[in-house]
Amino acid sequence: MTESAVANGDSKSASKFDTTFTQNVINATGPKASPRIRQVIGSAIQHLHDWARENELTVDEWMAGVELINEAGRMSDDRRNEGQLVCDVLGLESLVDEITYKLATDASDAPTASAILGPFWRKDAPQRAMGDTIVSGIENGDNTWMHGQVTDYLTGKPIEGAELDIWHTAPNGLYEQQDPDQPDMNLRGRFTTGKDGKYEIYCLRPTSYPIPFDGPAGKILQLLDRHPYRPAHIHFIVTAPGYKPIVTQIFDRRDKYITDDAVFAVKNSLIVDFEPLKGNPKADFELSYDFRLATY
Ligand code: MBD
Ligand code: FE
């Protein structure tokens, strides 16, 4: 390739190169490959080849990438999804979220916006009674009374039987599965709304925290001269019979990293205010937040 091809930064790279070789690779796809596989992997091969050509990728650079992928695999188990974390720091999980949930816009009368799942959700979090706390064994947390309503976004009607699956980090910045000192399933729970669609949960006002940076995701951050912090956030999966599930997060407006999330997940409509609360012996902060669901 030529210097000028690099310099003018033409992103429609397919035509810049003699791609007979790339076409041969794509054309090796057999007749039994499904149309979607043919399309998506064929396109991935095209982009990968163009990317290698555009950057005149060296053997050492390519091998460093291979090693990074292998290391992510070695580190991953059911407590840690390093491959997902690598995608997160590259913005890929947030991009796929954006592509998938076009309906969930930032308009205030739209369904609640989605946000990425991240690597720390666990299935089968304990079912808890409405008004219970998800906090156990933590003395130094900002206890918060979180409450609101789950409604149908079109009719405004309360949704009975909606399940809120909630999870967040401890003040030390760790999810329970990362932290041997926390009880199993701490700071997680599933709550089901009654007739009025209302919920209340005692949780903590979370803090900003660094995503695990002792592996490939951290290596990428370091190479790019980036920090590993996420703004304080609480994760939710909200489901209800007959409604589209929402995977989302809410973010603390006053957090230092609110405009600088290491995994690019913040959306305006998901930014919330924790208000100081007086006269409740169980909490120092109040957080009011409603979830609006869409039918299929
Ligand atoms: C997290 O806690 C998280 O929520 C995401 C999306 C990525 C890394 C760590
Ligand atoms: Fe998280």
Image (cartoon, rainbow, N blue to C red):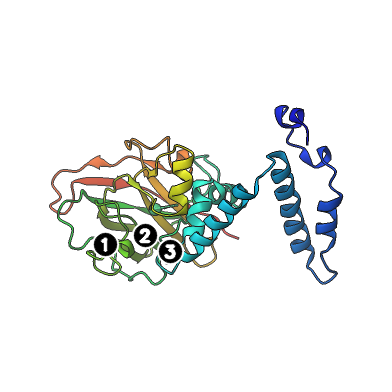
User: As shown in the figure, which amino acid type bears the numbered disc 1?
Assistant: Ile
The 10 Å Cα crowd at callout 1, few under 14, some 14 to 19, many 20 or more, is: many
| Mark 3 touches mark 1? (CB < 8 Å) | no
- Name the element at disc 3: loop
Residue 207 rendering spot, x and y as whole percentages: 29, 46
Q: Earlier in the sequence, mark 3 or mark 1?
A: 1
User: As shown in the figure, which amino acid type bears the numbered disc 2?
Assistant: Ile
Q: How far apart are marks 2 and 3 (CA)?
A: 13 Å
Give me the disc on residue 166. 2
Nearest the viewer among 190 and 224 is: 224
Give me the disc on residue 134. 1
Q: Distance between the residues labelled 3 and 1?
A: 18 Å
Residue 8 rendering spot, x and y as whole percentages: 73, 27
Q: How far apart are marks 1 and 2 (CA)?
A: 9 Å
| Mark 1 touches mark 2? (CB < 8 Å) | yes
- Name the element at disc 1: loop
User: As shown in the figure, which amino acid type bears the numbered disc 3?
Assistant: Ala
> Residue drawn at (18%, 46%), measured in percent from left and top?
284
Can you see residue 265?
no
| Mark 2 touches mark 3? (CB < 8 Å) | no
Q: Mark 3 points at which residue?
A: 162
